[in-house]
Image: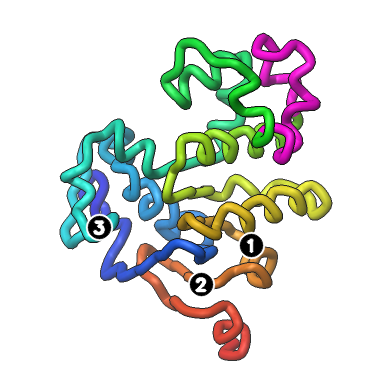
Amino acid sequence: MTIDSVPVLKDVNLFLEAGQFTVIYGPRGAGKSALLRSFSGLNREIYENVSWSGELLINEKPIQVYDKKLLRQMVSYVEPSFVEAMDELTFADFIKITLSESSVSLDDFTSELDRLGILKFLRRELKTPVRQFYTMEKIMLLLFAAIVKKSMIVVLDCILDHLDDDTLVPVLKELLNIKQDRIVVLSTRHKLRFLPIADQFVMMKSGTIEYRGPAREFVLER
């Protein structure tokens, strides 16, 4: 893949499957975001001059065959700027945007909201401003959207890097829960932080994959 004629990805070969938690590690500029945005076709919406070759398949079908709306339902992509953008919304606004529902009831989602620890923050119910949530609760809200949309691929692009260890625990617990029947991919600039829970570990540098395999083998090799 090139963006504005600058190579950003080269010879990338990666396989992801449901039930697997994949951690993609690399420094800034390694190509993590370009790769992860590809899953939902976002690069061409952000940049004017994007070209790529090769195949990107979901359920053995090229992503080009999927309608954009269906693709965005299948793939939930989340990155740090989403958390800031949410501050302008009420909970009702968030539901309307993420689920394309003009009329909703909290009763439809009570069990999910309670499990994720969000329900107790909805003091004004649907009118509750999202800016009243802490960062961890906003991330949980984004996971909630992925769950109720029944997204088969959940992508978190460096969104957990700035959470402290205690705050991180409930988020990781939920990710391990939802990975049972979904593909979960997390990118990070912190190599050791997420290794213990990674089923597959991928290390990227300068747009290429330098390691791909079990986290345990990566540790032993290093």
Residue that badge 1 annotates: 190
> Label 3, label 1: how many angstroms apart (C-alpha)?
28 Å
Q: Position of residue 75 (x, y in %)?
A: 39, 44
Number of the front mark, 2 or 1: 2
Question: Which sits earlier in the primary sequence, circle 2 or circle 1?
Answer: 1
What crowding class fits label 2: few (fewer than 14 Cα within 10 Å), some (14-19), or many (20 or more)? Answer: many
Tag nearer the camera, 3 or 1: 3
Q: Are marks 3 and 1 in contact (CB under 8 Å)?
A: no
Q: Is residue 214 above or below residue 80?
A: below
Q: Residue at x 74, y 51 (%)?
A: 168
Where does label 2 land, which residue?
Answer: 200
Q: Hey, what amino acid is under mark 1?
A: His
Q: Identify the image quadrant of residue 61.
A: bottom left
Find disc 3 in the rendering and name its residue: 57
Viewport quadrant of the C terminus: bottom right
Left or right placement of residue 182 versus residue 216 in this view? left
Q: Earlier in the sequence, mark 3 or mark 2?
A: 3
Instruction: Report the span colored magenta.
Output: 113-133
Q: Quadrant of the N terminus?
A: bottom left
How packed mark 1 is, by other alpha carbons closer than 10 Å (few <14, some 14-19, many 20 or more), is some
In the foreground, 48 or 144 = 144
Q: Is 13 placed left or right of 172 in the picture?
A: left
> Coloring scheme of the render?
rainbow
Residue most extreme to the bottom: 221
Is 115 included in the stretch rendered in magenta?
yes
**Which numbered tag is attached to residue 89?**
none
